[in-house]
Structures are given as structure tokens and as C-alpha cells.
Amino acid sequence: MSSKPIRLTGTSYAVLALFDQCGGEATSYDLKQALDTSIQNFWPVPHTTAYEEPARLAKAGYLTARQEEGGRRKRVYALTEAGREALREWAADPSASAPQLKEEAVLKVFAGGDPGPLLASRIAWHRGKLEEFGEYLDAVRGVEGMEGQERALTVGTGYHQKMIELLESLAAEVARAEG
């Protein structure tokens, strides 16, 4: 472990969890690919962070890092026991920070944007996410070792269903008000 401890953030734990899930070594590119089809759906991680955070975690001893000898000489990371232990401790802690809702369509409605097209577009987006989550759920449902992903996808599915209901209700209210 580094002599100068670092502060682990929610994103740090997201990265550690992905390395734990991959069960072996991975590059930052592999991490970004895994993020796009999993955690990104409920914990957005900026593209650059997916490349910077593994190096920061490796410097602190939570990941190992090695440079490939041939080819593109990519840096390959793997979870250390210290990283695995930090992840276990964090996951076992029953406290969690307050959730944040960042829904730009609602912000635009608040700012005076025309709710009709904004809400229709956002409802269509949530329906697309429901379809995407359904495919992910089909792939992990009942697969040993994928229980956490299945549970997260179940929550995500409920979230998108509820957002569709809320946005449709708001659209109907706006339509009634406009006569």
C-alpha cells in the first residue's frame, strides 16, 4: 500500500467492483467497456476517469499494474487483496450517501421549455433503457455469481418504469392545462 493513503470515492469503489467482477486482469479500455454495460446505468463515470482511476488505485496499492511487453504495450490492472478487502468493507457498510436525480428534461421544463417534445423524447429514452435492461437481465438471470448484477438491473428496471409513469402523468397534466 502507498505510504500516503488516498480517499476512496464512490467511483473508486465502482472501479474496484468491476475489477472484482472481471475476476482477473483488465485494461482501462476493458474497464470502460464494462462500465458502459453495467455501472454506467446507475453510477455515471466520466470517460477520462475510467482511464485515470485505475492508475490512482494502483499507486495506492488497491490494484496491481503491469505493462504488456509486445503489441500496443497496454497497461493491465488486477485487484489486490487490499483492494478486495476495501471493497468488501465498503459494500458491507449499511450507510450510503443520498441519491441524486439529474433529469435534464425536467430541468428544461422548469426553465420554461416546451414540455410536450421534451417529455415525449425522455419517455422514449426510458422505454429504450427498459428494453436494454431486459436484455441484460435475460443474460444474467439465474447465472451463478451474477446475483448482484441481477438485483441492480431489477432496481434499474423499476426506476425506468416509474420514470415513464411520472413523465406520462406530467405530460397528461400539461395537455389538460393547455386545453
Image: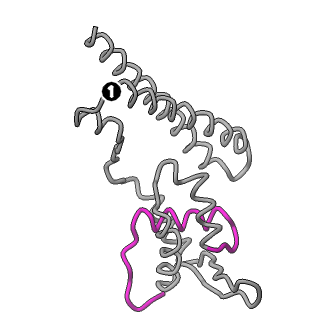
Q: Nearer the viewer, residue 44 or 175?
A: 175
Place of residue 140 in the rendered image (x, y in percent of width and height, measured from the top left): 70, 45
Q: Nearer the viewer, residue 167 or 97?
A: 167
Q: Residue 7, located in which quarter of the rendered image?
A: bottom left
Q: Residue at x 60, y 83 (%)?
A: 64
Q: Secondary structure at mark 1?
A: helix
Q: Residue at x 69, y 67 (%)?
A: 23
71 up-or-down from 141: above or below: below
Rate crowding at label 1 as few (under 14), some (14 to 19) or many (20 or more) other CA atoms within 10 Å: some
Please tell me whether residue 52 belongs to the stretch shown in magenta. Answer: no
Q: Nearer the viewer, residue 81 or 72?
A: 72
Magenta stretch in the rendered image: 1-27
Place of residue 98 in the rendered image (x, y in percent of width and height, measured from the top left): 31, 49
Q: How many marks?
A: 1
* Left or right relative to 53: residue 169: left
Q: Which residue is mark 1?
A: 115
* Left or right relative to 177: residue 4: right
Q: Residue at x 24, y 34 (%)?
A: 110
Place of residue 145 in the rendered image (x, y in percent of width and height, measured from the top left): 69, 53
Q: Residue at x 53, y 74 (%)?
A: 83
Q: Amino acid at mark 1?
A: Pro
107 up-or-down from 163: above or below: below
